[in-house]
Image: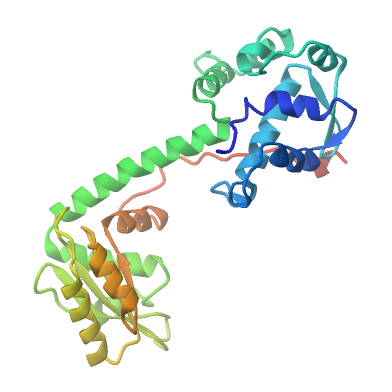
Amino acid sequence: MPIPDFQTLMLPVLRSSAMGEVRISDVVQSLANQFQLTEEERSELLPSGKQTTFANRVHWAKSYLGKAGLVELTRRGHFHITNRGREILANPPSRIDIRFLEQFPEFVQFRETGTSTDGTANTARTVEAVQASGMTPDEIIRKAQTELDDELSLDLLNRVTAAPPDFFERLVVQLLLAMGYGGSTSEAGRALGKSGDGGVDGVIDQDSLGLDRIYVQAKRYADGNNIGPGAIRDFFGSLDRFKANKGLFVTTSGFSSSARDTAELLSKRIVLIDGRQLAKLMIRFNVGCRVEETIQLKKLDEEFFE
């Protein structure tokens, strides 16, 4: 089954503390068993890589229960049920969610506490978004970031394909430099060859000393004009002529399935970067885009209060 959303987890989390103090990590494990999550679902990580998705949702469920006064923290990583929580379990609803929690004044106060510079309630807006989507607040933020990045990717590719051919040459150089290849801009520029067909063919140093080199080919094609297996085999032949063991093929369009299969079967390592991946790398390494605003996700530092 899919990983349950954090509102679905509220009642199970409350029940997990019915016998007294519990450790949140133990609750995560027991609920994973209760919901019969697969190993893949148990190990699925947030984009930060620091916490599993399921554990994150259990923590948010516990946090919202705490805002309504149904559970409270006891010590680091532990919590227990309150008298109000016991009263709820004495006659439990079929489900506890945000709408259910709105009956408690502490939760209503939590919703109305945060205000922005224009006097509107940020917390209320967040809770409304959480209630409507079923996602946790940090999942909403990450989803919004993904959508913004997807839109930026399209804008980047449109600008790249509309630019002159030599712009793509410079873009490939700058991106490889930003990724740590090629030494300096001038060295990378000398390594890459002249464009004859809207693409770039040449060699760039894998490190600043030139101890290892990568042969690079780039093709600036319109979307839908995918690279076929013939171009991959030609590129493989070029690697042989240059006595190179590694190759990087970059395109603004895409690769056919047969082209990808060909690259996998050949004896030399050839990495294929299509337009979608190219845009993601440009965003990741701030090539052709810049940081407009930084949002930091912070959490309570338990050690500070010990």
| In this rendering, position of residue 143 left or right of residue 270 | right
Which quadrant, please, contains the N terminus? top right
Percent position of residue 280, x then y: 36, 54
In-image side of 112 versus 215 (left or right): right
What kind of colouring is applied to the model shown? Answer: rainbow
Q: Is residue 274 above or below residue 192?
A: above
Question: Which residue is drawn at the image coordinates 67% and 29% (left, top)?
Answer: 9
Q: Nearer the viewer, residue 218 or 5?
A: 5
User: Looking at this view, is 40 or 233 the one in front?
Assistant: 40
Q: Nearer the viewer, residue 186 or 251?
A: 251
Residue 39 can be seen, yes or no:
yes
* Residue 116 seen from this side: no
Residue 293 in the image: above or below residue 182? above
Q: Quadrant of residue 198?
A: bottom left
> Compared with residue 296, is residue 69 higher up or lower down, i.e. above or below?
above
Quarter of the image that includes the C terminus: top right
Q: Residue at x 18, y 80 (%)?
A: 234
- Front residue of 281 and 292: 281
Q: Is residue 80 left or right of residue 100?
A: right
Q: Which residue sits at x=33%, y=50%?
A: 289
Q: Provide residue 70's location: percent of width, then percent of height.
A: 79, 18
Where is residue 121 drawn, in percent x and y?
A: 55, 15
Q: Which quadrant of the figure has residue 29?
A: top right
